[in-house]
Amino acid sequence: MKKTLLSISIIALTLTSCKNKTNPFLVQNQNIGLLTDSTQIKDLEVIFAKDSVVKPIAGDEFAGAINIIDIYEKGGKHLLSLTPKQALDSTATISSIKIKDERFKTEKGINNLSTFADIKSNYTISSIQNSFKSASVFVKESNIFFLIDKSELPAELRFNMSKKIEKANIPDIAKIKHFMIGW
């Protein structure tokens, strides 16, 4: 009887542990797959053991560069670009992540192939910032923000960074260029 109960317990534990496997492409407020807001730079090699981690070279911190760390699949596809909170510090955590691959999706199904209409129907837009090359769309429900290329906007907004961009100025069919999460 004890052996049967022990066998059933082991099988149940095995089945439940299989169901809890983390989706490596799910983007949530505190994590992207196995990356969390407390992941240290030194842990990237373990998390992305099957991929390529391209780190800045020592000495680059004096060149004025941002020291972005790029993650590529072994086949060469660009997955993510990470910005550490502290340049060239292996114990630093991640400040922001730019999602490059369309397989990464938010819990609401938004990815790099989505449109502004998809953002509007799934999130409450809190603000839109006008920058040199894109409009940054911030949402209330998340640390995620979406970048829309200015080429998708009306001509009067493409070259003037001082103009305020409103939701009504962005066409529903405007495609997301990238989306990012800031921690």
Image (tube, helix red, strand yellow):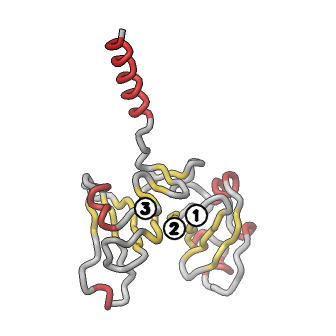
- Tell me which amino acid carries mark 2: Trp
Between circles 2 and 3, the one closer to the viewer is 2
Query: Dividing the image into 4 quarters, which one contains the N terminus?
Result: top left
Mark 2 touches mark 1? (CB < 8 Å)? yes
Image position of 131 with respect to 62: above or below: above
Residue at 48% x, 56% y: name it. Answer: 31
- Tell me which amino acid carries mark 3: Lys
Spatial separation of the CA atoms under disc 1 and disc 3: 17 Å
| Rendered location of residue 63, percent (x, y) | 32, 90
- Left or right of 33? Residue 161 is right
- Left or right of 155? Residue 90 is left
Q: Which residue is mark 2?
A: 183
Q: Secondary structure at mark 2?
A: loop
| Rendered location of residue 50, percent (x, y) | 25, 52
Residue 22 marker: none
Residue 143 marker: 1
| Rendered location of residue 103, percent (x, y) | 44, 50
Please identify the quarter of the rendering in which residue 22 is found.
top left
Residue at 57% x, 61% y: name it. Answer: 175
Q: Secondary structure at mark 3?
A: loop
Image position of 83 with respect to 5: above or below: below
Q: Secondary structure at mark 1?
A: loop
Image position of 170 with respect to 12: above or below: below
Residue 100 marker: 3
